[in-house]
Image (tube, coloured by chain):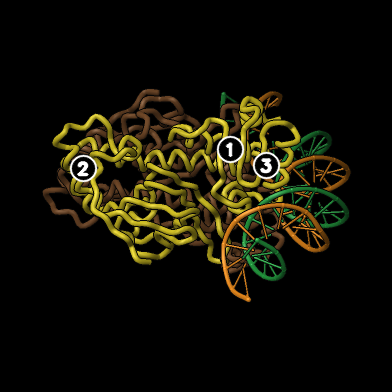
Chain colours: A brown, B yellow, C orange, D green
Amino acid sequence: MTPETIKVACSNCNLRELCMPVGLQPADLRRIDEIVATRRKVKRRETLFHNGERFTSLYAIRTGVFKTRVTSEDGRDQVTGFQMAGEIIGLDGIVNDHHTCDAVALEDAEVCVMPFDRIEELSREVTALQRHVHQIMSREIVREHGVMLLLGSMRAEERLAAFLLNLVQRLHARGFSQSELVLRMTREEIGSYLGLKLETVSRTLSKFVEDGIVAVQQRHVRIVDADKLRRLVNAPAC
Amino acid sequence: MTPETIKVACSNCNLRELCMPVGLQPADLRRIDEIVATRRKVKRRETLFHNGERFTSLYAIRTGVFKTRVTSEDGRDQVTGFQMAGEIIGLDGIVNDHHTCDAVALEDAEVCVMPFDRIEELSREVTALQRHVHQIMSREIVREHGVMLLLGSMRAEERLAAFLLNLVQRLHARGFSQSELVLRMTREEIGSYLGLKLETVSRTLSKFVEDGIVAVQQRHVRIVDADKLRRLVNAPAC
DNA sequence: CGAACAGTTGAGCTTGATCAAGATGAGTGG
DNA sequence: CCACTCATCTTGATCAAGCTCAACTGTTCG
C-alpha cells in the first residue's frame, strides 16, 4: 500500500456540497481546506482500513465505490454498506480509537484523508463544521435503522427492490441516470448486505426480469418499471 | 404528557460515569451541569419522542428501559434497540431536525433532558465533552453494525443467545446480577428486534430451558449455563 | 489459453412463519 | 376479594421462503 499523496483543497472541489457544509463564509471555507491532509488512491480489492487498525482519520470518497463489512468471531461476514463519491467512511473507529470494520474498494478509488483530530479542532471553531460532523454521524445512524428494518422485516423481493431503488437514487443525486446502473459489487456482496444468499439474489433478479421490472445484463441493470419496483417495497405486509 | 421537571446537576449524579466523560477538571465538571436542563418522567407505554417530532434534545436515561422503533411506510415496525440507565437516546433526530423513530418507555422511567444546542455550544469549549459526543454517536454506529450482523447472518437460536448475553452484560455493568435478569419487553418486542416472530422467540426460549441453558419464569430469566449460551453465539457457521 | 471467478438454474430440504387453540397471569370493577 | 377480561405466552400442525448442494455456463484476467 503506497499512499500516493497529493495536497489538495476542498474549496474548489466539485464534490464539496456532498461532503462539506454549504453556505460557509469565505473565511471559514479557507479554513476547511486545512482538513484534508492528503489524498490516497486505493486499488480494487484493497482495503482503505481494516478491523483492528488504529483510527486516525475519516475519509471522504472522491471516486470509486467501497463496501464496509464486519466479521463475527466465527468468521462470518456482513456487508454493512456500500459507499460512493461524497460519502464519509471511518466513523466506526472513533469510539475505541480503532476500526471495527473493513473498508474495501470495489473498484479503483480515491479518497480524501481527513485526520480526525484536525476535524475536532476545527469544528470547535467553525460552528457549521461541528454541526456537519454531527449530521453525518446521525445520518449514518438513521441509515442503519433503515437497514435494520429491511433485514428484520422484509422479504427477499422487497429487500432487493429497496436496494436497487436506493442505489439508483444515490447515483442519480450524483448526476447519473435515474434508470440505469452498473453494480460494482457481486451477487454475493449484495446478498451479504441484504441477508440473503447469492443464489437468492440471482433468482430474485431473474424474477424481476421475467416480470418486466428490470433488464439485467451482467452487472448492468436497467430499471424498466420503477413504479412496480416502488410498489414492491411499500407493499402492505400481506 | 405533563413533564414533571426538576432542576438537577450531573456533577453529583451516580450515573455520571455512564453518560458523561470521566476525568474532567472540576471547572469543566461544573460547566457540564449546565447541559441538563430538566428531568422528565415518562410513564410505561408513553413515548419520550416520536417519529416526525421536532428534535431539540438528547436524553440520558436515569431509570427505566426504553425501546426505539422505526416504522416503514406500509406500517411494519422494527425495534431498533432497547436502552437502559446511562444510555443516550435521540441521536436519530440530529440530521434532519426531526426524529425518525419512536422512543417508548417499557416501564415508568425518568430521563435527563439535554438541549442539543447547549451540548453543541459547550462541546466547542470543553474538549472532553466534544470527544464524548463523538464517541457516543460512533458507539451507536458500531452497535448497529452488530445488529446488522445478527439480523443478516445468524439463526434464531444464535440471535436469542446473543440478545440475552448482551442484556445481562449491560445489566451487570450497572451492578445487577451476571446471571439473572427481568425482561422488560414482551416476546413480540424481542422478536421484532431480532427479526423473528414471537412464537419463534417463545419456542427458542423453551428449547433453551429444555437444554438446561436458562430457567424461565415469565419474564424472569436465569442463565444456568452461560458457556453454552456463549458457544451458541460463536458457533462456527455450520 | 486456461484457470479461477462469477452467475444462473434446478431439486430437495430446513428453518422459521403462519394459523390455531389453550394456558397463564395481571389488572379492573363489582 | 373474586370474577372477568385482556394481554401475553406456550405449544401444535402445517406450510412456504429461502437455503443448500450441485451442475453448468459465461467472463475475466494473468
Q: Is residue B214 left or right of residue C28?
A: right
The amino acid type found where label 3 is placed reads: Ala
Name the quarter where the N terminus of chain B is drawn: bottom left
Say if labels 3 and 1 share a chain: yes
Q: Give the alpha-carbon distance from disc 2 to disc 1, as whole Å.
A: 34 Å
Mark identifier at residue B164: 1
Label 2 SS = helix
**Mark 3 Cα within 10 Å, few/some/many (few <14, many 20+)?**
some
Label 3 vs 1, first from the N-terminus: 3
In the picture, residue B23 is in which quadrant? top left
Q: Which residue is mark 3?
A: B156
Give the residue displayed 44% in from the left and 36% down from the top. A108
Q: Which residue is mark 2?
A: B32
**Mark 1 Cα within 10 Å, few/some/many (few <14, many 20+)?**
many
**Looking at the image, residue B121 lies above or below residue C21:** above
**Looking at the image, residue D6 lies above or below residue B11:** below
**Looking at the image, residue B71 lies above or below residue A112:** below
Give the residue displayed 22% in from the left and 41% down from the top. A9
Name the quarter where the C terminus of chain B is drawn: top right
**Chain letter belonging to callout 3:** B
The amino acid type found where label 2 is placed reads: Ile
Mark identifier at residue A93: none
Residue A82 image point, x, y percent: 48, 44
Say if labels 2 and 3 share a chain: yes
- Kindly indicate whether the residue at mark 1 contacts the one at mark 3 (C-beta within 8 angstroms): no
